[in-house]
Amino acid sequence: MAARHAALPGFRDFYPDEMRRRQQIFSAWRDVAIRYGFEEYDGPPLESLDLYIEKSGPEIVGQLFNFVDKGGREVALRPEMTPTLVRMLGARIKGLPRPVRWFSTPQLFRYEKQQRGRLREHFQLNMDIIGEESVLADADLLAAALDVLRSLGLKSDDVVARYSDRRLLHQALLELGVTEENLAVAYNVFDKVDRDPREVCIERLAAIGLSAKQADDALSLTSMTPADLERRFSSNTAFAPILQDLDQYRSALGSLGFADWIQLDMKIVRGLAYYTGIVFEIFDRKGQLRAICGGGRYDNLFSALAGIDVPALGFGFGDVVLGELLKDRGLAATGGQDPDVYVIATEPGVDILRIVAFLRERGRSVLFAYRQPDRMNLGKSLKAASSANAKDALLAGDLADPIGNTQIIVKNLSTGEQRNVSLSTYIEVRV
Ligand code: HAM
């Protein structure tokens, strides 16, 4: 019976404990997005299939949950938010002051092989800046992603943002003899360089026409530091502006307080097809988990999808890997929202519902027994109040009018301390 009704593979049930942890992540996301001046938006979870074909790249297209709807339309559950954002904003951007800063927290669906940190549905914080070329926007965006982690109690020795630049990689690979049409293959080699044996990488580069020496040179890029890049490329005019941008990026992130959280890593190319400039992914330092967050510049996607030439950048920050990391580090939320008050009638027939309503109207969370006994048993009622984890038990006998003047006994359930007060005084004191 249980197995027959279990959630589908890769889909989660959120019992209250999991929901509490989900809310912890959502409130950190929302809090940071608002502190960085982003406005919230959302779109539909189901989109036309062709929104994703070509632009998202083969990896995502192979993972789509797609079907033909009853009206004969080819549709897909959204696997990522960026195409929806571009579609929505493409229709409105003309009237909007730029840069536009928007965030969203969509649930996304990808038919992936289920493994640690990868499910068939997940939530993502998406933060995107549209209509801004300056590299300061790139720095501010990464700072926001890192701030989410910092606000949840993680430190620079827990996580690292590895960044790179697609323009730099593009230029360097062209110089090494990779042709435009083979760039995607070369990017893929870089993307998998940590997973694949070196011979396999060399072989794959040889298959797109690189000599052993050229392949070796290409692979040496993957371990370069900023100083290595400077030495190797700064005299080349095609590279100079890119290196300058990267310098400014690093220095801005330093001023924003994240110098220790970032590291150049030319292996970061990002799986999605649309990135054009600085790209980044955030990982746990121990390297035990998959990427926590990823994003970058995608300056051509608006012209490809919406026919508008506008620069853009953004990231997707998933809840699954972050949730694992918080649990591993003992930072995940525990314990529920305990009620403030448990109201108990000390005599039969007392209309405690009026007290309950009085307290709830004033913002207290209040519980009471749905089954009032015919004969009062104070011990049993107090036990119920304690097992509900209420802070105070409130004992009410005779109800005088007006209700605020009603005298009650308040028992603090953690100290056992007891006092007599009016309801109005109780409300004033316990804000
Ligand atoms: P992405 O790298 O595909 O980027 O996903 C971003 C993050 O979402 C990943 O780093 C990971 O934390 C999480 N994620 C992705 N797939 C799964 C999965 N199957 N299960 C659990 N978590 C997952 C994008 O989606 C881009 N649209 C981000 C972006 C926004 N770029 C610009 N703006």
Image (spheres, helix red, strand yellow):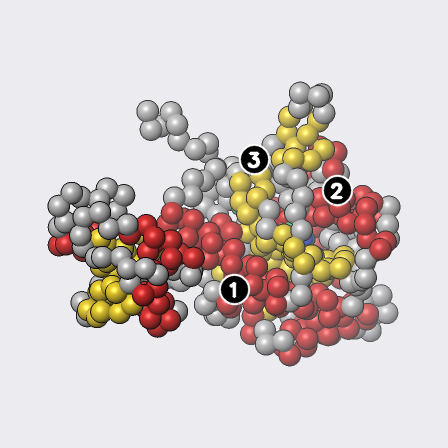
Left or right of 352: which side holds 40? right
Snapshot quadrant of residue 176: bottom right
Question: Which residue is denoted by mark 1 in the rendering?
Answer: 149
Nearest to viewer (mark 3 / mark 1): 1
Q: CA distance from mark 3 to mark 1?
A: 27 Å
Q: Position of residue 312 (x, y in %)?
A: 76, 57
Image position of 11 with respect to 335: above or below = above
- Which residue is painted at 62% across and 64% down in the image? 34
Q: Which class describes the residues within 10 Å of circle 1: few (<14), some (14-19), or many (20+)?
A: many
Question: Which residue is denoted by mark 3 in the rendering?
Answer: 111
Q: Are marks 3 and 1 in contact (CB under 8 Å)?
A: no
Q: Please, what is the three-letter code of the amino acid marked with disc 1?
A: Leu
Residue sitting nearer the eye, 134 or 383: 383
Label 2 element class: loop
Image position of 272 with respect to 292: above or below = above
Left or right of 385: which side holds 86? right
Label 3 element class: loop
Left or right of 33: which side holds 52? right
The tag earlier along the polypeptide, 2 or 3, is 2
Question: Which residue is denoted by mark 2 in the rendering?
Answer: 55
Q: Please, what is the three-letter code of the amino acid marked with disc 3?
A: Tyr
The tag earlier along the polypeptide, 1 or 2, is 2
